[in-house]
Image (cartoon, helix red, strand yellow):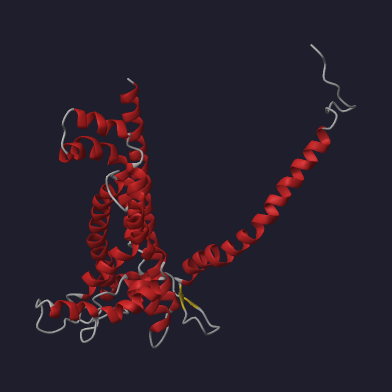
Amino acid sequence: MTAVPTDAIGTPPGGGARRRRVRRTELMVYLFLLPTIVLYGLFTVYPVIGSYWYSFLDWNGFDAVKTFVGLANYAEILADPMFWNSFRITVTFTVLAVPIKVFLALLLAILLNSPRMPWSGFFRTAFFLPVVTTTAIVGVVMQFVFDPASGPVNLGLMQFGLLDQGINFLGDSKTALPTVVGVFVWKWFGTTLIYWLAALQTIPRDLYEAAAIDKAGPVRMFTSITLPLLKPFTIIITLLTLESTLQVFDLMLTMTGGGPFYATQVMEIYIYEAAFASTTPRLGMASAAAVLFGLFICAVGLFQLLGIRAARASMGSERKGEAK
């Protein structure tokens, strides 16, 4: 065995130069990451920490005087019926949007994933186009689309004789929230569709061919092959969709502004109005509401993490079963 030559301190020749090159490479990596770290700290980490601190203050955001009030803002928020109304509307919006978005996207993904489906690439692109459209622009345009006098929706319904006069979809407290739910589902439908298409690609085509040889119909293939193998993905996609429905500020603000009569005032709009749109801005109270809403989102994220772990465990057990 040939001995490796070393220098006086036991380092192989060229080892010091190699370490210096590694250090220079690491330094360059950190230098390239520095702008991102600084910007992320200024615009994400600092505001989050600041919100916790401001939630203990009585401050309008402009005066230099900041009065420490402890948990008074939290007590006021929890006693405010408008806070609970906003929380209820947020939950209602989620309960309405998630099942519609998940199951409709699943059915359409199964159709588009079929090799016998013509123009599948065109339809995939068409359904994904609204995703890349600016949400604020979509909200403004939808105000004209659902206009009770000249909107194409009302004109079309009256043209077919389904209505005698236009419906104020966004001005009626009974129809405003379902209307925004429909627009939200249409706007972000392509994202959930891509998730399902990716999940369907993991199912081996041989299983369907074997089922066809056994003369299994589409319904039997769906219940015996597609649904069982999509179970882990169903958990993940549902949780991702659930989390996305909690971020509807831009769409809701541009379409309804939280009205009519607070019928669409989700938590984000409640926080925004308390901080900026009220006669006397109360940044401390808005921060307290934001902290409480943030804790709720963290709970949803924890639920999502547990769901993903359960999905991975289910996938692992299924693979072990297949290996046996």
Q: Is residue 104 visible?
A: yes
The x and y percentages for residue 87 are: 28, 67
Q: Is residue 254 left or right of residue 63?
A: left
Residue closest to the far top: 1
Q: Quadrant of the N terminus?
A: top right
| Up/down of 24 relative to 141, above or below | above
Q: Quadrant of the C terminus?
A: top left
Task: Choose top left, top right, bottom left or bottom right for residue 244.
Answer: bottom left
| Up/down of 322 relative to 139, above or below | above
Total tally of numbered discs in the picture: 0
Say which residue appears at 51% left-offset and 79% top-offset: 66
Say which residue appears at 34% left-offset and 78% top-offset: 141
Say which residue appears at 37% left-offset and 79% top-offset: 273
| Up/down of 322 relative to 159, above or below | above
The x and y percentages for residue 105 are: 27, 54
Q: Is residue 267 left or right of residue 152?
A: right
Task: Choose top left, top right, bottom left or bottom right for residue 199.
Answer: top left
Say which residue appears at 31% left-offset and 59% top-offset: 189
- Residue situated in front as seen by the camera: 81 or 119: 119
| Up/down of 311 relative to 176, above or below | above
The x and y percentages for residue 63 are: 52, 85
The x and y percentages for residue 283 are: 44, 77
- Residue situated in front as seen by the camera: 253 or 92: 253
Q: Is residue 251 left or right of residue 181?
A: right
Q: Is residue 81 left or right of residue 3?
A: left
Q: Is residue 296 visible?
A: no
